[in-house]
Amino acid sequence: MKTKSLIAQSRTFHIPIDRRRFFKSMALASAGFTLPGYLADALTLSPQVTQGPYYPLANNIPLDKDNDLVQLNDSLTAAAGIITYVSGRVLDSNGNPIRGTLVELWHADREGDYLYSTSAARNPACDPNFAGFGQFLTGSSGAFKFRTIKAGLYQGRTRHYHWGVTIPGQLTRTTTQTFWNETAYGLNGNQWATQNSNDNVYSTITDAVQRASVLLDYTPVPGTTTGEVQAAWDFVSGLTPAEPAYPNGGSLVAAGTLVAGPSGSDARYKITIPAYTGYSYEIYGNPTIANLAWGALPFSLSQTGAIDRNIYTAASDGTLDFYIEAKSVKGINYVSNRGPGAKTGTPGSGGGGGGAGGPGGPGAR
């Protein structure tokens, strides 16, 4: 029997394929996550399963590592496949939302190829328009949302998504996978040899209720004619979130100062923070939707240098300057940090990012 849903009735909405409209329309998703009285009397902890071999290498992760895997940067060409939305919340075992949780998603493209496969370079077989990886930092509602494509099939596995969830105060991510509640068919229309029942990950989840909790029902997005589908799924953590203090206190929320860009007329925004040895930093634009999420932003370490990174580990204590291309929608940015000992995005069974969030920020990775 499947677990009781944490949301009595999800609100349906159509999100168009246009990238900018996608982020604006995410506001519609938040309404279903903030109404009281919708918790079931008992929550099922999400099962922990293998991270798998294809968590992307640090240099394979897209520069725009946001929650839209369908389009890269400002490209007008979308990834091939059925547009798919997954939304939900990160909750503790008592049903309380956990803010500042880093939610990561990665999976195979329509043809069954991963962004990272066997070498340090991006897998050339992977759809060049598919991001392959995305991340989301939850706000106070604990809600997350991704736009991606239906995962492809490859030998030995049924259709699945990989998830990494790092709650504040943890140095490592918790990994799990979600599956389709359907019979899997290949692109040629033939039934796939590996189904949920004989998949080497799904079949090893011994608790039947936990196993059912990661078997998702995808339904058509109302009003669309292109086959878009959606599913709701809540990640329930058995860990207790913590808000570690940043060295010497202070907030890592900053508005940014307008400065000239590389050509003199191209504006950039300078963000300055106190940095400490071994801490890794990421920049998030302030949310376009109140209390929902912060979008990861690429940056440069110099005023005229290339916008070429999305994470930086400080080699010494001191003041650190970041430069971003665009002002946040509401004028502020949050600099997330991961403390010494937290991993910065490499494959392996340990996985994980963790660390401290400055007071006043949405939390930590």
Image (cartoon, helix red, strand yellow):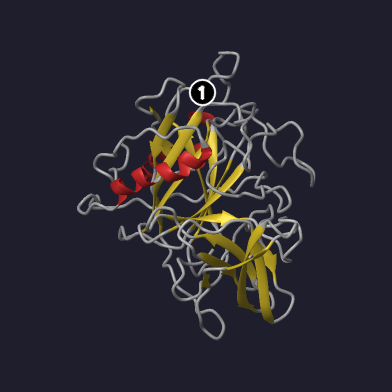
Would residue 128 be visible to someone looking at this image?
A: yes
Image height check: is 317 above or below 54?
Answer: below
Q: Horizontal and vertical percent for residue 264?
A: 73, 60
Quadrant containing the C terminus is bottom right
The foreground one among 275 and 156 is 275
Q: Residue at x 42, y 20 (%)?
A: 225
Instruction: Decide if residue 97 is on the left or right side of residue 196.
Output: left
The foreground one among 34 and 172 is 34
Instruction: Decide if residue 181 is on the left or right side of residue 266.
Output: left
Image height check: is 294 above or below 7?
Answer: below
Question: Circle 1 sits on which residue?
Answer: 184
Residue 79 sits in quarter: top right
What is the residue that sits farthest to the left in this orientation? 37
What is the residue that sits farthest to the top in this orientation? 189
Disc 1 residue crowd, few under 14, some 14–19, many 20+, Cα 10 Å: some
Q: Horizontal and vertical percent for residue 159?
A: 54, 31
Q: Horizontal and vertical percent for residue 304?
A: 75, 62
Would residue 6 be visible to someone looking at this image?
A: no
The foreground one among 354 and 226 is 226
Which amino acid is tagged 1? Ala
What is the residue that sits farthest to the front in this orientation? 265
Considering the numbered disc 1 on the image, is that residue within a helix, a strand or a loop?
A: loop
Number of numbered markers: 1
